[in-house]
Image (cartoon, grey):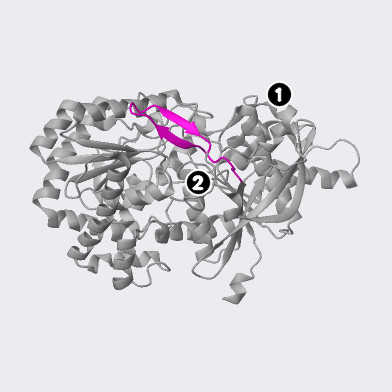
Amino acid sequence: MVERKRMRPRIAYFSMEIGLDSAIPTYSGGLGMLAGDTIRSAADLAVPMVAVTLLHRRGYFFQRLDADGRQREEPAYWGVEDYFKPIDQTITISMEGRDVAVRAWRRDVVGHSGHTVPVILLDTDVPENSDYARTLTHYLYGGDARYRLCQEVVLGIGGLRMLRALGHDGIERFHMNEGHAALLALELLEQQLKARGKNEPGPTRVSEAELEAVRQQCVFTTHTPVAAGHDKFPMSMAREVLGNLAALDEGAIVECDGVLNMTSLALNLSRYVNGVAKRHADVAGEMFAQYSIDSITNGVHAATWVSRPFADLFERHIPDWPKDNFSLRYAELIPREEIWNAHQAAKNRLIHFVNRSDNAGMEADVFTIGFARRVATYKRAGLLFHDLDRLKRIADSAGPFQIIYAGKAHPHDEHAKQLIRDIFKAKESVAPKIRVAYLENYDMELGKLLTAGVDLWLNNPQPPLEASGTSGMKAALNGVPSLSILDGWWIEGCIEGVTGWAIGSDGHRKLPGVAGSTRPAPAPRDDTADAALLYDKLERVILPMFYDDPEHFREIMVHCISINGSFFNTERMMHEYVLKAYFR
């Protein structure tokens, strides 16, 4: 145990956002939640890791919704000093021809093994910087493209230099969680060029051996087939921001279609690349056909996302579950009545919170559907309200139900903001027959309440744009089945009528025509057809089972835990990264 605590980091994990705690708004959604869960499992498994991210002093944003669903964004103020320790170390990076000072903060994540993973947070809000430079680490995904590029310089180049300055010289692998950190690979390449330049004066071009030396140090996880998720910057802007960086002249290694494409840069300079679900690896392989892309399906940190009632239940029946998530398969042996009682305790807590927060008048004995995630058009948050008359007829014929929504739209995404307003309008149209609540300021704590307390988790993205998804995994750990489109992780997790239900079938559609793809975009899935499939499953299978055959429904709840909860966790995921990516 003592020896584990003293292990020096050999893996550096870089992520633009990391969900460490609900009170620390340094995350916006699934990418940050995954990063936090990854770090927690690394600490549990004593993986010698250090993590690097930015200190977002104003967070992503604090969401306010008016009576019509109009979103207003406010800075998310919080006390940095309450959660992080300052590090007495400053490094300098050059941006736009000026030096920018970067300081660091630290928070330790301690696993049940006693092992510690330090998280280093970079901060440009220091007196010696210009007013603009001081704001560069304030807002997660804020500002314009230039602001974003400057942030990625701080994360990738500044993060690498900070690790060196802190004495982390034994790093063997740099893991880039999405392309935001890709400039660290460019900095590694720059170091190769500088090292050779000392011995060989005059102009130099990178050799294949030097490229390979950089690749051997880098691991890259790509997270999205959505074009907007792949950061691209004009080369003119890149040269203005990065200055006279020799590595920028390395042609096809750096440029893709005349721009600095962070995904392509990471792909070109990584020894191992993976998608975040088996289907996503296939989709990414079609998007970037010249690269070898493996798959490591995402997971969630079980001890973080299991609700208190279920944690107490597991403690009685499966005491080793936090240290051995696979032992959750023994949930099959837990009496169904105890599973139901734990669920009801979690549900009561959620319903009380919703009624206090939203004055929704919800009832704990009514079937409750949950839909909560980052609001984006491809996630189709309003699909459930496609046919309001049909929805109301289902409530009359199959049994009453209520719906809880939550989610933030990006401040610049007007289409997503309109989706929220549409849901608010539909909410009024189906009342009072169907009660609907839309909860403000979706965060980690609210996510815990929702994924544990609803009776059904709904997910209906436009395939194949859901790379993985993890909210349904959190629900499964708490015995909550999913009704979902077969995309992302659900292709692997859905056993029809056993762990939940599919909306339609897996059509194996080809990916849309986005960056790097040689295939044309397919026609979008038909919302009318998908809504009808959703309604059919709800009316003919799920609601009748819940109200008329509760024993069957409880069996499905148990299978959610024993089959999906025991597998779709970051303990299993981290084992795969260790074996496939880190130490292979």
Q: Please provide the residue range marked out in magenta.
A: 55-75
User: CB atoms at circles 1 and 2 under 8 Å apart?
Assistant: no
* Res 236 label: 1
From this viewpoint, is residue 208 visible? no
Q: Using the numbered discs, state the Cα–Cα distance from disc 1 to disc 2 in whole angstroms.
A: 30 Å
Secondary structure of residue under mark 1 = helix
Q: Residue at x 15, y 31 (%)?
A: 392
Circle 2 sits on which residue?
A: 32
Residue 488, numbered label:
none
Quarter of the rendering occupied by the N terminus = bottom right
Magenta span has 535?
no
The quarter of the displayed image where residue 250 is located:
top right
Instruction: Name the one closer to the observer, 442 or 211.
Output: 442
Residue under the point 19% across and 31% down: 431
Does residue 94 sit above or below 565 in this rendering? above
72 within the magenta span: yes
Which amino acid, by three-letter code, is at mark 2? Gly
Which image quadrant for residue 190?
top right
Q: Nearer the viewer, residue 109 or 322?
A: 109
Q: Residue 525, position in %: x, y?
A: 31, 27
